[in-house]
Image (cartoon, rainbow, N blue to C red):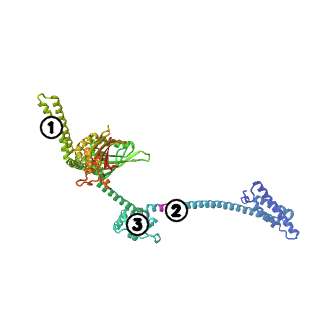
Amino acid sequence: MTVTGTGRWFARPAAAAALRYGLAFASIAAAMGLARLFLYFHLPQPFAAFALSAIAITFWYGGNMPGIVAALLASIIRYSHWSETHAASRAIYDLVFLIFAFLMMAINRSRSELEVSVAERTADLTQANQELSLEIAQRKRAEEKLRQSEAYLAEAQKLAHTGSWVWRVDGKEALHLSEEWYRIYGFDPKDGMPTFDKRLQRVHPDDRARWKETIDRAIREKSEYEIEFCILLPDGTVKDLYTVGHPVFDASSLLVQFVGTTTDVTERKRAEEALRRSEAYLAEAQRLTHTGSWVWEVAPRRALHLSEEWYRIYGFDQKDGMSAWDQRLERIHPDDRARRQQKIDRAISEKSEYELEYRIILPSGTVRHLHSVGHPVLDASGNLAQFVGSSTDITERRQAEEALRQAQADLARISRITTMGELTASLAHEVNQPIAAAVTDANTCLRWLNRDQPDLDEAREAASRVVKDATRAAEIVSRTRLLFKKVSPQWESVDMHEIIREMVALMSGEAARYSISVWAELTAELPEVKGDRVQLQQVLMNLMMNGIEAMKDADGPRELMVRSQATEDGQLLVSISDTGVGLPLQQADQIFNAFFTTKPQGTGMGLRISRSIVESHGGRLWAADNSSRGASFHLSLPTKVETHE
């Protein structure tokens, strides 16, 4: 027999059995002791009552078997100590003990079943409680995640300026409006959800009819809708919004709701408008400056961007798209293709910028001069990925430069003619000398031939002098004609010593008119320079003429010195010094300005033209006062320069 209740009192099986059966003997012994005690005091002998109590205690705490043992012990003791005279009394007592034993057994069984039931119920309740606790914890976690998700969603909507909403089709009543939606529309959540009319009232009057028509059409067609419109807040603020709505159907496929989002695109619209304005300004600036921008990938050599002005410069139609980039090579001038490609290839290999000028020929035959600049773009690995740059149509500038060069050449020629006009007397004297010498030598030759015995050797020598003097006169005339002649600049190797000697010879007559001594100190074996011979002659003639004019009325020695020397940086330095009045006080820095002159009849262009000529040769021209008296003009020219284009 299983005794469930006693498990609480006895932990080990063997000890529990001994205690249960010991309880039977102890309880009956206690009942007998109490009965003896009552007998001693001459009280009624309630052994049966005590025995029943002992049996009940043993059954309750010891279990069924110890209870039966207690009942048997009680019967034995009653027979041995308190035997009744009547058999019926004994039978009744035995029956009472037996019934009581069975009753206690039934009670124990019921108690055990109850305890088992209670234990099972307790276990079920415990398990249910644990499951409930787990469910509560899970629900709390879910609620916490939901709160976090809602917080993240609210923050995301705030950052994206996007509000969510749900509204019922029937009555167009709002069912849900997010916090960001209230902020966008300028409503206060504390006032509750605004009605459809209030929401419609916020739509800009210019967009209200279109907004309402869009929603009505979506309801009729049971379709999604999207629309961009403006709202007008009470404070006058105008916002640009973009709304997307999605239909929701019930089980019967009836349209019941619309769920969607509204995004505040005001900043994006402003940025787009600013970008459009910027692009328009850039396009206008490119049109005004005749500059087209471009971007091309290095590996496939394909264009990624070509501006509108680029198409105009190259004579393509924008409808041709990026294919015009490949066709542009056909329009590059044949004489410039190799040079242009060489510079681009070098820029690719060196990952460097490039800058070049070249010509293109349009289908109409028009030639344009372009100036292109490219800037390299490297990827994250440092590899060359793209070139971004611009191409400028410099045709008008080139034409203006050519016109300027022609005007400068014409002005320089006029200046030469003017100077030569001032040297007319000196030139006549210079030409007259060799002619007079030739006449004298010719007469001498005739005399030697008219003698009775002609002296052929003397006549031959006189004739040689005639040829020499005539050649000298011809050279003077030739040099003078060259200075008067209108020709394009001819760049060649020029011996500056030869030019200096020619100019000294040409100016010596003019110098002699004013008792001016002309000296030349030339360093031997100076390298030649690249330049135009006539232009360099004009510079020396202008500087020497200025020196002569500065000494016309000067007191004391009048000397014009021309020196040449090589500098440490590879320049050829020519100095023309005089002993005249020197540079004008407080105006020395203005003498090279156009139209500045200290001469009563001067044009103020001589020194300006001279400096322009020297600078076009890559050199410098400057002036300084001498330490004693007079002034010196210095010009430096490079001895190693590229051929002028």
Q: Position of residue 162 (x, y in %)?
A: 43, 62
Q: Quadrant of the C terminus?
A: top left
Label 2 neighbour load within 10 Å: few <14, some 14-19, many 20+: few
Sequence-wise, which precedes: disc 3 or disc 1? 3
Q: Can you see residue 47?
A: yes
- Disc 3 residue type (three-letter): Val
**Mark 2 and mark 1: Cα distance apart in space:** 124 Å
Main SS type for the magenta part? Answer: helix
| Residue where numbered disc 2 is placed | 147
Above or below — where is 440 with respect to 240? above
Magenta stretch bounds: 144-155
Which class describes the residues within 10 Å of circle 1: few (<14), some (14-19), or many (20+)?
A: some
Callout 2, which amino acid? Arg
Residue 119, percent from left and from top: 67, 60
Mark 2 lies on a secondary structure that is helix
Q: Find out whether the residues at labels 3 and 1 contact each other: C-beta distance under 8 Å.
A: no
Q: Earlier in the sequence, mark 2 or mark 1?
A: 2
* Quarter where residue 165 is shown: bottom left
Q: Is residue 151 magenta?
A: yes
Work out whether mark 2 precedes mark 3 in sequence or the reverse, and give the earlier one. 2
**Circle 2 or circle 3, nearest the eye:** 2
Q: Residue at x 78, y 55 (%)?
A: 15
Q: Which residue is mark 3?
A: 169
Residue shown at 44% from the left, 60% from the top: 160
